[in-house]
Image: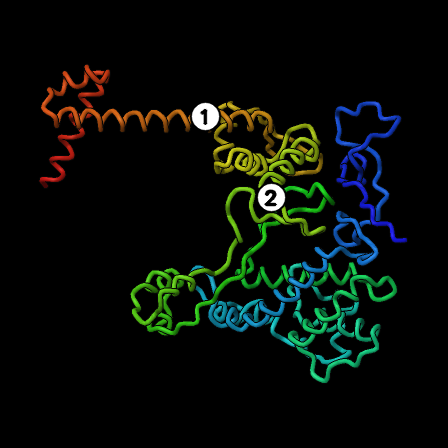
Amino acid sequence: MTDTRRPPACHHDRTLDARVTREHRDDCTDPETHNGCVPCTAPHCVLCGRNHTNNDHPLTCPDCISRVRTDLDDIRWSCRHLRWQATRAGRDGRLVAAAPIPGGDAMVMLARAGADAEDLVWSRHLDDDHHAQDVVPPLLPLLGWDHQWRRYFGHQPPAKPSVTGITHYLADHLTQMAQTSTGPDWPGFARDIAALRRQLEAVLHDERDPERGVSCFECGDRLVRKFSAPKPCRHVAQARRAGVTVTQWVYTLSTYPELDDDHTQCTDQGGIADPSVGQSWECIGCRKHYTPGEYANAVRSDLLRAGPDGDGWTHVAMAAEAASTQTGIVFPANTVRRWMDRGKVASLCRWVAGASWGQRLVFWPDVAEEAAAAVERAYVAEQKRAERARQKQQLAAAVASGLDVDEAGRRLGIHPARVEVFVEEWAAEQRQTAS
């Protein structure tokens, strides 16, 4: 009889570096300081290491299979737009086609690497001249994995390999690939596909590095912000043919009556999927998608435990990001630096032997308190502005009803000095209207 009981939920404990349940061992000395210490004995997904597996999915959970399938779809979609990126895209008004290497990285990724079939399979000798920052033509790793999986399944290789054909083939057999332990390296395949997807995203977003956050509290890898898919404009208009800058092109979109009501979507060139505080963060290791609350907890945990020395001292940019996540109000790094210069928060310069320069650090608990105080001050200021606007409106209504301005101010309890300011503001508004 099949055991249908579900194992207890578990979570990753950084101190123990293991997944544990919420139960405590019999010899636990301080159960109040942590959320459990009994190791989870259930089998976990080989990709995320987070979800439990079962008889139907003995190696890989359905969530991870779905993410790999989405990566393959994104790779296929991105490769179709490499030609557009190489010929028309750019930044700061400069086309990629006019770059030192015409077409830039997009043109490099379009190449078939000068080989075909077995010659296109990746080998360690290619690393001799390959740098970490160099892009890789998508067909190169895809065809390498395609040959391995086709050989394992006993399928014939395609006569003319293509990104579209390979990604469709891999997606069709993904469920079987994810649950085999005797075939090619499935976790390595998933990592390569995810890395290829991120590389294509970077190229289609003009080679901008993804914004990196704190470490994942599930696997310890770094968090990155996910890019959304850009929507290249397909309209052909006089401004584009004239070769104007990107800024001018976006500005003149509304001047063309031939564009439909949907033309505003042409200005969406991707970027972070949701730039709101705490949104769009995912782990590049276990692929966990973080909610704003989970990301806030990860930031606080990383600052207090995994900072430079785990003692609360952290980098200025990381403290600013944490304060923004905690309060919901954006605090730039320069704001934290001003707090440091004015002595509102503790700071120090940490020097390491052998380094040319010291590193300026800030004490995170002080930053958290100052950010909370700044939010409180902003709230009080907003309340005062609203009260002032209300008093001005009430005074204007009382004067309009025939009361003397000073008498109206006394009845409404408005300070005489503020009444004078209101009168001066009304006089200035009238002069501006008359002019």
Q: Is residue 275 above or below residue 77?
A: above
State the residue lying farthest toward the bottom: 159
Q: Of label 2 and label 1, which has the lower sequence position?
A: 2
Say whether residue 425 is left or right of residue 320: left
* Amino acid at the residue labelled 2: Thr
The foreground one among 252 and 104 is 252
Category of crowding for the residue at label 1, using alpha-carbon neighbours closer than 10 angstroms: few (below 14), some (14–19), many (at least 20): few
Residue 308 % position (x, y): 68, 34
* Amino acid at the residue labelled 1: Glu
Residue that numbered label 1 is attached to: 376
Secondary structure of the residue carrying tag 1 is helix
Q: Label for residue 291?
A: 2
Residue 144 % position (x, y): 76, 71
Count of all numbered marks drawn on residues in the image: 2
Image quadrant occupied by the C terminus: top left
Query: Which residue appears at 72% of the width and 80% of the height?
Result: 116
Query: Which residue appears at 51% of the width and 27% of the height?
Result: 372
Is residue 358 visible to the viewer in this orientation of the structure?
A: no
Residue 15 % position (x, y): 78, 34
Is residue 267 visible to the viewer in this orientation of the structure?
A: yes
Residue 52 % position (x, y): 79, 49
Q: Is residue 295 above or below residue 258?
A: above
Mark in front: 2 vs 1 = 2
Residue 326: image quadrant is top right
Query: Which residue appears at 36% of the width and 26% of the height?
Result: 383
